[in-house]
Amino acid sequence: MASVPYINYKDLNEFYTISEVCKLFEMEKSELKKKCEKYDIQPRRNEIGEHGFVKYDVRKLHNAIYHEAAGQRAWEDDPWA
């Protein structure tokens, strides 16, 4: 069972604050921070000074966490394998 809910990537906004990602992923801020450190995906500051994640990073982080439960390592797949 995945530790984050399914998300339709087509429906994502261009930018999410840290709090918004916590709601989207249904996790606490401390847990999100650990996952970000694990997958080396860090918040960025947008043009108005808010810290958060661009759509690409939300997708990348979500995909990595989503596949954890199945033991898959989608973020490290070898395209030449």
Image (tube, helix red, strand yellow):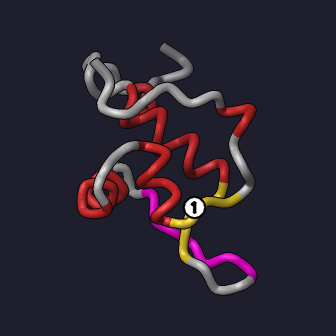
Residue 66: x and y in percent read 39, 29
Residue at coordinates 25% horizontally, 54% vertically from top-left?
A: 31
Dot 1 amino acid type: Phe
Crowding at dot 1, Cα within 10 Å, few <14 / some 14-19 / many 20+, comes out as many
* Highlighted range, magenta: 41-47
Residue named by callout 1: 53
Judge left or right: residue 10 versus residue 28: right
Residue 54: x and y in percent read 65, 58
Which picture quadrant has residue 17? bottom right
Which picture quadrant has residue 3? top left
Residue at coordinates 32% horizontally, 48% vertically from top-left?
A: 27
Residue at coordinates 66% horizontally, 33% vertically from top-left?
A: 9
Q: Magenta includes 66?
A: no
Residue at coordinates 43% horizontally, 29% vertically from top-left?
A: 5
Residue 61: x and y in percent read 46, 44
Residue 40: x and y in percent read 39, 57
Determine whether 48 is above or below 42 in the image.
Answer: below
Location of the N terminus by quadrant is top left
Judge left or right: residue 28 versus residue 26: left
